[in-house]
Image (cartoon, helix red, strand yellow):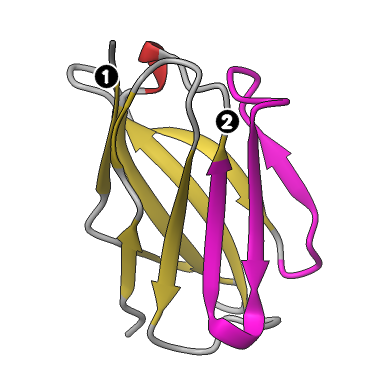
Amino acid sequence: QVQLVESGGGLVQPGESLRLSCAASTLISSNYDMRWYRQAPGKQRELVAAITNRITTTYANSVKGRFTISRDNAKSTVYLQMNSLKPDDTAVYFCNAVYIALGRDYWGQGTQVTVSS
């Protein structure tokens, strides 16, 4: 069982930045692909960014050029750097870990990001 704990959310104004962190309870190294999802009120959960065990990254079109996902395997932590935030980025952000060998995934509890003036 993998436990994921997100942190770094908060209330910011449009144009500002936040960095989210996701700490895993196990070594993520080469065994896990890591992802960030978000869910806004009344909307479906959507994939924001992903980073594979080989450090290949993908992004939703809505965040390309503004968000950067990275991972520090030694710290078992994944980050989401969010710049030029917009009100549409307001959502609960969830960390997701996929155990590659079995296709099993794990979720964190989420962290709230609110972008408002």
Q: Quadrant of the N terminus?
A: bottom left
Q: Nearer the viewer, residue 15 or 36?
A: 15
Return the x and y of residue 114 as percentages of the image width and height: 27, 27
Q: Is residue 99 above or below residue 93?
A: below
Return the x and y of residue 14 as percentages of the image width and height: 42, 15
Looking at the rendered structure, the kind of residue marked 2 is Asn
The magenta segment is 53-81
Return the x and y of residue 49 as percentages of the image width and height: 59, 42
Q: Is residue 57 magenta?
A: yes
Write the residue at 64% across / 80% down. 73
Q: Nearer the viewer, residue 18 or 54?
A: 18
| 63 to the left or right of 94 | right
Write the residue at 61% across / 79% down. 101
Q: How many neighbours does mark 2 have within 10 angstroms: few (below 14), some (14-19), or many (20 or more)?
A: some
Q: Nearer the viewer, residue 19 or 106?
A: 19
Q: Which residue is mark 1?
A: 43
Write the residue at 57% across / 81% down. 28
Q: Which residue is mark 2?
A: 83
Residue 103 visible at all: no
Disc 1 is placed on an element classified as: loop
Q: Is residue 34 magenta?
A: no
Disc 2 is placed on an element classified as: loop
Q: Which quadrant of the figure has residue 33?
A: bottom right
| 55 to the left or right of 39 | right
